[in-house]
């Protein structure tokens, strides 16, 4: 089945589809990033689960967020949580520091009533924080999850509060930016591109596309996640590269380039996928072609 962009345009007034998940009723829900002109526009479109025909918008038009990217839902809690993302037509030109503080990079975490398809709460995670990946814990009894903010380097826990049956957020991790020279800005953010949680809910994994490391955090009830593992898979701060780290709150020296079977790995860790037994973590080294070309030109040669 091929769904043409023009059909999405005319039927849903959307144009930049992103993350896909199946719904409990068998239909397919796809998050949206922008309108047909490339301006920011969140929300979702619904596909028929059997024919894959485009059905409709999921949300009410008046409740579409300014931007969108990822989402996760919890059936027992009757809730869907979605992240913000970027304005497509601006992000498509590459990363420009002048775009900071102009609303190009999203900042909201949205909470929806799953059955009514209505927006119930919004959380402001900070200007230019850029919340991308959002995940609930796998335990169906656990009413909590995590969202990773790419530019601020913050990871927030969202959870159901006892007060008025609402949801709340708290910052539990912040990966500090590094003072650098030879880069586009004097401070380099981690740029958390993805986040996954192990099937047993013991560990949380994040990929820092610019810093180049994948981190493993141990999750424990009523405690903040604890860093227990770290490995570098490329990145922009490697020894011998054009970027010099002037001040680093975490590392004593710049990491070495990664070489696998006599071949150097370029780019930085982006999308993550964990095996069902939790023993193998798969990672891509490409985030977005325009940004790949800007920050990792050797990746696309």
Image (tube, rainbow, N blue to C red):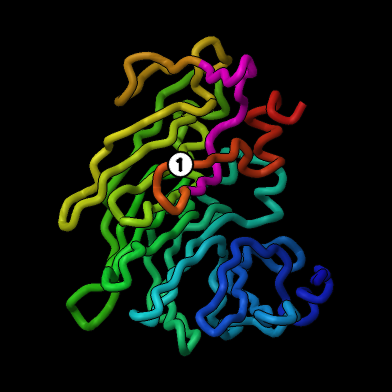
Question: Which x, y percent locates residue 101?
Answer: 51, 49
Question: Which residue is tagged 1?
Answer: 280
Question: Which x, y percent locates residue 199?
Answer: 37, 56
Does dot 1 land on a helix, a strand or a loop?
loop
What main secondary structure does the magenta stretch of the protein show? loop
Quadrant of the image containing the C terminus: top right
Quadrant of the image containing the N terminus: bottom right
Does the segment drawn in magenta span residue 3? no
Residue depicted at 67% across the width and 32% down the height: 294
Question: Which x, y percent locates residue 43?
Answer: 58, 73
Residue depicted at 31% across the width and 66% down the height: 139
Residue sitting at the far front: 277
Residue depicted at 28% across the width and 67% down the height: 159
The quarter holding residue 190 reads: top left
Task: Relative to 166, say whether 71 is above or below.
Answer: above
Residue depicted at 63% across the width and 61% down the height: 18
Task: Relative to 17, say whether 7 is above or below.
Answer: below
Q: Nearer the viewer, residue 89 or 224?
A: 224
Does the segment drawn in magenta span residue 268? yes
The quarter holding residue 248 reads: top left
- In the picture, measured across the screen, residue 41 lies left or right of residue 1, that is left
Residue sitting at the far left: 222
The quarter holding residue 25 reads: bottom right
- In the picture, measured across the screen, residue 60 lies left or right of residue 250, that is right
Check disc 1: other Cα within 10 Å, few if <14, some if 14-19, many if 20+.
few
- In the picture, measured across the screen, residue 41 lies left or right of residue 55, that is left
For the magenta stretch, what is the residue range? 257-274
């Amino acid at each position: 089945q091929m769904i043409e962009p023009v059909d999405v345009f005319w039927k849903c007034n959307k144009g930049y589809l992103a993350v896909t998940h199946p719904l409990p009723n068998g239909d397919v829900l796809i998050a949206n990033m922008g309108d047909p002109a490339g301006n920011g526009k969140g929300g979702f479109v619904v596909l028929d689960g059997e024919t894959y025909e485009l059905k409709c918008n999921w949300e009410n038009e008046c409740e579409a967020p300014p931007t969108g990217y990822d989402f996760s839902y919890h059936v027992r809690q009757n809730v869907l949580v979605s992240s913000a993302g970027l304005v497509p037509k601006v992000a498509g030109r590459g990363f420009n520091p002048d775009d900071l503080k102009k609303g190009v990079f999203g900042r909201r975490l949205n909470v929806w009533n799953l059955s009514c398809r209505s927006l119930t709460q919004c959380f402001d995670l900070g200007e230019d924080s850029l919340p991308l990946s959002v995940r609930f814990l796998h335990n169906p009894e656990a009413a909590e999850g995590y969202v990773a903010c790419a530019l601020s380097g913050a990871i927030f826990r969202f959870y159901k509060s006892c007060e008025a049956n609402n949801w709340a957020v708290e910052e539990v991790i912040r990966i500090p930016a590094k003072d650098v020279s030879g880069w586009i800005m004097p401070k380099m953010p981690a740029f958390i591109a993805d986040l996954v949680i192990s099937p047993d809910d013991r560990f949380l994994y994040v990929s820092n596309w610019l810093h180049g490391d994948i981190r493993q955090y141990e999750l424990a009830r009523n405690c903040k996640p604890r860093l227990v593992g770290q490995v570098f898979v490329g990145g922009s701060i490697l020894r011998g590269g054009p970027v010099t780290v002037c001040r680093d709150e975490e590392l004593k020296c710049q990491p070495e380039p990664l070489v696998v079977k006599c071949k150097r790995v370029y780019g930085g860790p982006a999308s993550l996928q964990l095996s069902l037994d939790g023993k193998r973590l798969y990672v891509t080294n490409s985030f977005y072609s325009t940004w790949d070309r800007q920050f990792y030109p050797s990746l696309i040669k």
